[in-house]
Image (cartoon, helix red, strand yellow):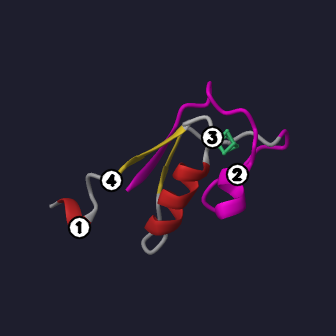
C-alpha cells in the first residue's frame, strides 16, 4: 500500500498527523512533507484513518497490493 499526496490540496490542518505523525510527516510549516510513501506492514489501518481525516482530500491510497484485493 502506498500513500499518494496531492500537495497542491494540502491546507496544513495536520489532521492526518494527529492520526499518525510517523506516517504523515509534516514539514516545519505544518504541511505534508512528501508526495508518495510506502505504508509499512501493519500500518494500513492507520493510513486509511489518516486519509479519511483529511478534509481537503489531499490523500489517496494505492492499495493494489492489499491482500483483500487479490
Ligand atoms: S490533513 Fe490533509 S490538508 Fe491537513 S496536513 Fe494532512 S494532508 Fe494536509
Q: Residue at x 72, y 60 (%)?
A: 18
Mark 2 element type: helix
Q: Earlier in the sequence, mark 1 or mark 2?
A: 2
Q: Considering only vertical position in the picture, is 44 above or below 32?
A: below
Quarter of the picture holding the C terminus? bottom left
Question: Nearer the viewer's eye, disc 1 or disc 3?
Answer: 3
The residue at which mark 3 appears reads as 55
Q: Is residue 40 left or right of residue 32?
A: left
Neighbourhood count class around disc 4 (C-alpha, 10 Å): few under 14, some 14–19, many 20 upward: some
Q: Which residues are magenta?
A: 1-29
Q: Is residue 23 left or right of residue 28?
A: left
Neighbourhood count class around disc 3 (C-alpha, 10 Å): few under 14, some 14–19, many 20 upward: some
Neighbourhood count class around disc 2 (C-alpha, 10 Å): few under 14, some 14–19, many 20 upward: some
The residue at which mark 1 appears reads as 67
Q: Is residue 9 one of those drawn in magenta?
A: yes
Question: Nearer the viewer's eye, disc 4 or disc 2?
Answer: 2
Q: Is mark 3 within 8 Å of ligand 1?
A: yes
The residue at which mark 2 appears reads as 15
Neighbourhood count class around disc 1 (C-alpha, 10 Å): few under 14, some 14–19, many 20 upward: few
Q: Earlier in the sequence, mark 4 or mark 2?
A: 2
Q: Earlier in the sequence, mark 4 or mark 3?
A: 3
Quarter of the picture holding the N terminus? bottom left
Q: Is residue 43 one of those drawn in magenta?
A: no
Q: Main secondary structure of the magenta part?
A: loop
The residue at which mark 4 appears reads as 63
Question: Nearer the viewer's eye, disc 4 or disc 3?
Answer: 3
Q: CA distance from mark 1 to mark 4?
A: 9 Å
- Residue 45 at x, y = what percent? 46, 67
| Mark 3 and mark 2 residues within 8 Å of each other at the beta carbon | yes
Amino acid at each position: 500500500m502506498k500513500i499518494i499526496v496531492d500537495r497542491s490540496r494540502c491546507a496544513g490542518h495536520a489532521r492526518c498527523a494527529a492520526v499518525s505523525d510517523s506516517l504523515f510527516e509534516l514539514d516545519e510549516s505544518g504541511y505534508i512533507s512528501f508526495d508518495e510513501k510506502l505504508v509499512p506492514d501493519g500500518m494500513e489501518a492507520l493510513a486509511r484513518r489518516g486519509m479519511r481525516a483529511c478534509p481537503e482530500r489531499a490523500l489517496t491510497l494505492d492499495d493494489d497490493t492489499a491482500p483483500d484485493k487479490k
